[in-house]
Amino acid sequence: MILTGPEINAAVHDGRVRIAPFEPAQVNPNSYNVRLGSTLLTYTGDVIDAHHPNPTQEIEIGPAGLVLRPGELYLGHTMEEVGSDTFVPLLFGRSSVGRLGLFVEITAPIGDIGFHGQWTLMLSPTRPLRVYPGMKIGQIMFFVSIGPVDLYSGKYQAALGPQPSGYWRDQTGTEAVAR
């Protein structure tokens, strides 16, 4: 079951869903619009290595926007911190943004129950596209979970800003140093 807009409002007000900052105008019939934060990360190495941390470059999106280029992966973030200890959140790109040729969540739309923080967005444009901080970029839906709940306490908890992949930690069990 998916929460409707009125139930999202109720869940925010009674604490079952946390969204900060919360804007009632961003509630849709069955989702909540999230906005693009002002910071992006790009990987700077020639090869991304799944077993090692990868160096990144931080890019600030100014008021005039920033042109995203095809063939590049940009890690962005939501302005909002979103999470729930009750519901399972899923984030998808808005259809109007998809119609501009921007993939917002390429492979990882599901959030863990118990995660609270800004969401990292995997942005991949099909054509050069100018984006702006604060633009509505995605929407989060909340689903009812069934069964015992084991709250998320992983490496991305309380994330602020875009987070590079921590996949290498899962593979090596160590804190390797970026090359």
Image: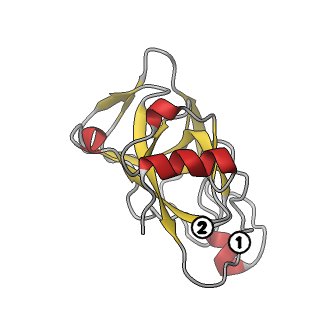
Q: Secondary structure at mark 1?
A: loop
Can you name the residue that lies furthest to the left here?
A: 99
Scheme by which the image is coloured? secondary structure
Q: Position of residue 169 (x, y in %)?
A: 69, 72
Along the polypeptide, which appears first: circle 1 or circle 2? 2
Quadrant where the C terminus is found in the figure? bottom right
Indicate the quadrant containing the N terminus: top left, top right, bottom left or bottom right: bottom left
Tell me: residue 95, above or below residue 111: above
Residue 119 appearing in the image:
no
Spatial separation of the CA atoms under disc 1 and disc 2: 8 Å
Label 2: element kind: loop
Residue found at the far top of this picture: 64
Nearer-the-camera pick, 101 or 49: 101
Residue 156 visible here: yes
- 51, 64: nearer the viewer: 64
Q: Residue at image x 27%, y 33%? A: 128
Circle 2 sits on which residue?
A: 112
Residue 126 horizontal/vertical position (percent) = 25, 44
